[in-house]
Image (cartoon, grey):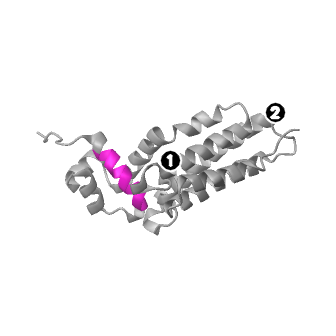
Amino acid sequence: MGRRREFDVDQALDAALCVFWRKGYEGASYNDLTQATGVERPALYSAFGNKEALFHQALERYYEQQLSFFSAALAQPTSREVAAHILSGVAELNTRHPEHSGCFLINGALAGSDESESVRQTLIEFRAKGEAQLRERFERAKEEEDLPQTANCSALAAYVMAVTHGMAVQAKAGFSRETLEAVAAQALATWPTNT
């Protein structure tokens, strides 16, 4: 008969998420994860599988708990409001937690060895999915004549994502929320209009 778990799985997952957020997948050691979660390695394996499986669960947790602003942004009435909502959400999220600033997705994918390539690819695909949703939203804005017919929706979505990625890197480097909001305002200053 197996032993009962003596720890809260949700709390352990939240703690692991913070470690991955701060250090990325490659930088997070099992020692970091066991110290943060307060769970010994065998119990961590038993509950979550290996480090990669734990990372994937942390990624899902991050999406559920931290990125709701993205879906809300896609529902905004104009393309500019969509972009403004995303950039505002990114500025807030990337500076909300001083102990793990920046973006979980960017922090985890900037560098890695061949052994962690599958994790890096997962993060790239995750971000690409968000960019595709944004492109589709901008294409709808173009159909609704909110964007000019000359607007390149793919480039516009890539631009917004590039700005969010840059903001995440700046947040990791210690830039303030006010600075990130100024970057967002500058990005929005040249937003294409249909007038």
The residue tagged 2 is 143
Helix or strand or loop: what does disc 1 sit on?
helix
Q: Where's residue 173, x and y in %?
A: 51, 64
Nearer to us in this view, 6 or 11: 11
The answer to whether residue 13 is magenta is: yes
Residue 10 image-quadrant placement: top left
The C terminus lies in quadrant? top right
Nearer to us in this view, 137 or 42: 137
The answer to whether residue 128 is magenta is: no
Q: Which residue appears farthest toward the bottom when viewing the image?
A: 113
**Amino acid tagged 1:** Leu
On screen, residue 180 above or below 142: below
Q: Where's residue 113, x and y in %?
A: 46, 69
Q: Residues within 10 Å of mark 2 (few under 14, many from 20)?
A: few
Q: Where's residue 185, x and y in %?
A: 68, 49
What residue lies at 60% left-to-right and 44% top-to-bottom? 88
The residue tagged 1 is 93
What residue lies at 29% left-to-right and 57% top-to-bottom? 33
